[in-house]
Amino acid sequence: MAKIERARVLVTCPGRNFVTLVIETSDGVRGVGDATLNGRELAVAAYLNDHVLPCLIGRDAQRIEDIWQFLYRGAYWRRGPVTMTAIAAVDTALWDIKGKVAALPLYQLLGGASRESVMVYGHANGNSAEETVERALDYKQQGYKAIRLQSGVPGLASTYGVSKDRYFYEPADADLPTENVWSTEKYMRVVPELFAAARDALGWDVHLLHDVHHRLTPIEAARLGNDLEPYRLFWLEDAVVADNPESFRLIRQHTTTPLAVGEIFNSIWDAKLLIQEQLIDYIRATVVHAGGITHLRRIASFADMFNVRTGCHGATDLSPVTMAAALHFDLSVPNFGVQEYMRHTEETDAVFPHAYSFENGAMHPGEAPGLGVDIDEKLAAKHPYRRAYLPVNRLEDGTMFNW
Ligand code: CS2
Ligand code: MG
């Protein structure tokens, strides 16, 4: 029985901050897990170093479920982003080890492939609807079958999802939170025009997605969903803050535009009502923030009972370790919808060598044993941590609002 012999937390910043857990067994098998919580990275690193790692040493590395329960029930203070991200890192690293011991790629341990590849969506954005559509055409030419559109809003200096760079988007860009200004009225006028222009230019054989990023009230979201119905969106994401899941009942009453939610969910309990009442169509919970592969499989099985499909979060602040784990999960899960793929920079990819690949709008985790990703510790050490915060939002009258 291989025991957990060593474990260490690596914090590195190749372009942006990442927290990675490395676990090594008495048989010399190594596993990696992502523990990155954007803008709160050091909180998870401390939780792991000070509270979790001491409990892991000497345990049977094969007992993933028991260790999951030990860290969840044993914490007493269960759930929440820091705890569930720490548990996720341990869980992912142990699944990586189990795959290596079995000499199988992880998806084979998760039940094998349910499809040939994983449809991903790309991120077309621009300062104007025209610029966004022009970039979306570029993504279509690259073979993407699904494209998220985010455009600037006239009268607002900046808005979510619009980056200075054509391909890379990193919102955590300052060592103190940047204060942006938001106006729902200005935004609501732009989005239907953007999708009308997009359908004209791109046609109907490509899926289009949009992220509202938690910025509307339920009735505003209902109106936007309605206004967008002619453009047949694949999904409208985080239309409202999901703290009060009942809000989605009002949206459902007024629109058939599919709804996606859950990237900030940490446990099945955050999603239970929304799934059970079929108030959403896609669950965005992901490996790194929802308790790892072990817990995400539970969420997906529950969602499957209610015709809800997976649409895992995959932004740049989720490291290549999470991208690899997500692709193994996506290839095997029966109720798969789509996977988000926000490209990492070359600098990041160099620190995290990986087997997954992209081709013609789809990805595959590869056939390497375990996750098929690792961290180059020497290279990682060359990129010290740099404090960085996500922006915050204020309304035009100065009122604090959701970013
Ligand atoms: C977003 C993210 O990709 C998405 O759907 O909601 O970019 C999100 O803003 C970041 O992951 C926050 O860290
Ligand atoms: Mg989102």
Image (cartoon, rainbow, N blue to C red):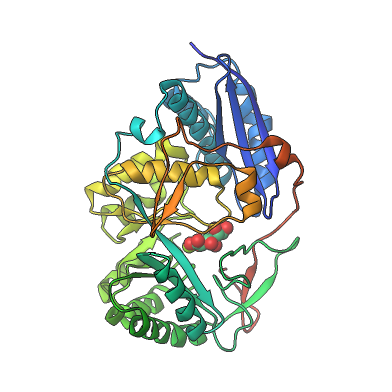
Identify whether 213 is placed above or below 113. below
Res 135 seen here: yes
Q: Quadrant of residue 361?
A: bottom left
Q: Residue 154 appears at what percent x and percent y?
A: 56, 88
Identify whether 159 is placed above or below 316. below
Identify whether 143 is placed above or below 287. below
Q: Quadrant of residue 375?
A: top right
Q: Name the one closer to the observer, 1 or 106.
A: 106
Q: Residue at x 62, y 54 (%)?
A: 346
Q: Residue at x 66, y 79 (%)?
A: 398
Q: Residue 41 appears at what percent x and percent y?
A: 66, 47
Q: Residue at x 66, y 39 (%)?
A: 45
Q: Name the one closer to the observer, 353 or 332.
A: 353
Res 77 seen here: no
Q: Name the one closer to the observer, 80 or 104.
A: 104
Identify whether 333 is placed above or below 7. below
Residue that protrudes farthest toward the top in the picture = 1
Q: Is residue 66 left or right of residue 401?
A: left
Count of all numbered marks drawn on residues in the image:
0
Q: Residue 176 appears at what percent x and percent y?
A: 75, 63
Q: Residue at x 41, y 62 (%)?
A: 121
